[in-house]
Image (cartoon, rainbow, N blue to C red):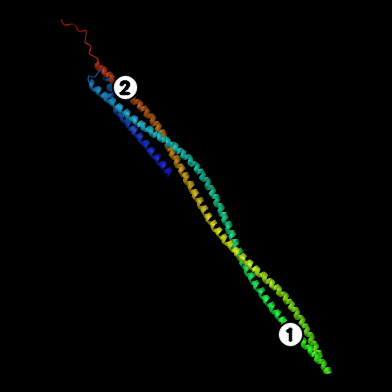
């Protein structure tokens, strides 16, 4: 806005300069036409000694002198106005030169800012790419954690079912042990009854003994199975406990990863906004730099015009000084002619002494 106002003022002052120049030339021509190119000038010089119309010529000379003084006064007014305009133009020239220097500095600063903005925009774009890659990695890790969590949950269920089956096997083994003890007791009773039967019970005694041995083997195997099942049950319970802990930790880790993913998403969104803003800032800075360069060129043009105006005013002032001096000299010459004419009118006629006296 200031630069446009400065340019407007420069145009106005330039117009004023041209106006005064034309006014001054018109006035100078008018004065010269009225006073230096009239038919009275040769008559004043060549015919004053011979004319008999002395009062009329004196009147014309006095009018010419009055017009000369009036022309000099008008020329001095124009000269004073030109001095004022010249002072204003010099001030304007100094102001435009200062403005041009300030704009050059500002343009340099804006160019530096534009370069920095471009660098920041490039770095923001790179940061956005890295953030997008990191976000993709985080999202992949979240999916892996979810899959791992599902696997741990399935394993937990399998181990938990295994513990349940182990307890069921232990119960069955206990039933088998109880049955083998009952069979062993029955075989012992059968052996006692066979001994009472004597010779008739020998075969039954052999069978009872074999049954007793089989019952003992069954009991031993059942006890061994029970011990194995008990060990398996303990290990299964420990595995279930560990799986429960792992499942809990996996769930917490999954939640943490999801939170990290959410935060990374926010960072990604913020980075995108920053990158867009930096890009817009870079574009605006480039546009501002181009605008400032145009303004600098305009101010330089205004400065050039103002310099030409100042030089033209200096020439016009020199011409005006010369014309004023010429006018003053002509007025003084006219006054001298008037004084000469007045002296001629005041000189008395000398009588002719050579004529003879009357007789």
Question: Which quadrant of the rendered structure holds the C terminus?
Answer: top left
Q: Which residue is mark 1?
A: 179
Q: Position of residue 293 (x, y in %)?
A: 48, 44
Vertical placement of residue 354 versus 119, above or below? above
> Which callout, 2 or 1, points at the residue further toward the start of the chain?
1
**Secondary element type, mark 1:** helix
Residue drawn 77% across and 87% down? 185
What number of labels is visible?
A: 2
For this rendering, which residue is in front, 141 or 208?
Answer: 208
* Residue most extreme to the right: 199
Q: Is residue 112 left or right of residue 211?
A: left
Residue drawn 41% across and 42% down? 5
Q: Which residue is mark 2?
A: 333
Q: Position of residue 103 (x, y in %)?
A: 48, 42
Q: Quadrant of residue 298?
A: top left
Vertical placement of residue 166 versus 357, above or below? below
Residue drawn 71% across and 81% down? 172
Using a 10 Å C-alpha cutoff, classify the residue at mark 2 as few (fewer than 14 neighbours), some (14 to 19) or many (20 or more). few
For this rendering, which residue is in front, 208 or 148?
Answer: 208
**Secondary element type, mark 2:** helix
Q: Is residue 324 left or right of residue 53?
A: right
For this rendering, which residue is in front, 262 or 168?
Answer: 168
């Amino acid at each position: 806005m200031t630069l446009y106002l400065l340019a407007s003022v420069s145009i106005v002052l330039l117009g004023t300069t041209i106006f005064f120049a034309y006014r001054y030339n018109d006035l100078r021509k008018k004065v010269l036409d009225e006073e230096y190119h009239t038919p009275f000038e040769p008559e004043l010089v060549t015919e004053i000694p011979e004319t008999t119309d002395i009062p009329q010529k004196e009147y014309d000379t006095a009018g010419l002198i009055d017009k000369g003084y009036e022309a000099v006064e008008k020329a001095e007014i124009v000269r004073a106005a030109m001095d004022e305009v010249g002072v204003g133009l010099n001030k304007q020239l100094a102001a435009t030169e200062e403005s041009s220097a300030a704009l050059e500095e500002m343009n340099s600063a804006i160019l530096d800012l534009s370069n920095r903005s471009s660098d920041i925009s490039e770095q923001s774009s790179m940061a956005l790419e890295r953030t997008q890659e990191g976000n993709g990695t985080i999202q992949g890790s979240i999916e892996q954690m979810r899959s791992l969590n599902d696997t741990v949950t399935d394993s937990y269920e399998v181990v938990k079912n295994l513990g349940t089956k182990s307890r069921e096997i232990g119960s069955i083994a206990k039933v088998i042990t109880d049955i083998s003890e009952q069979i062993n007791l029955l075989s012992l009773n059968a052996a006692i009854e066979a001994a009472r039967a004597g010779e008739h019970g020998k075969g039954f005694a052999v069978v009872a003994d074999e049954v007793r041995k089989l019952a003992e083997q069954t009991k031993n195997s059942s006890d061994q199975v029970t011990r194995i099942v008990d060990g398996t049950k303990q290990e299964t319970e420990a595995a279930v406990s560990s799986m429960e802990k792992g499942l809990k930790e996996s769930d917490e880790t999954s939640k943490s990863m999801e939170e990290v993913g959410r935060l990374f998403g926010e960072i990604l969104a913020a980075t995108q906004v920053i990158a867009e803003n930096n890009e817009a800032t870079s574009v605006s800075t480039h546009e501002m730099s181009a605008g400032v360069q145009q303004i600098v060129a305009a101010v330089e043009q205004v400065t050039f015009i103002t310099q030409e105006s100042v030089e033209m005013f200096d020439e016009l002032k020199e011409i005006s000084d010369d014309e004023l001096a010429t006018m003053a000299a002509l007025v003084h010459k006219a006054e001298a002619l008037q004084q000469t004419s007045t002296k001629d009118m005041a000189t008395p006629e000398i009588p002719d002494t050579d004529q003879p006296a009357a007789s």
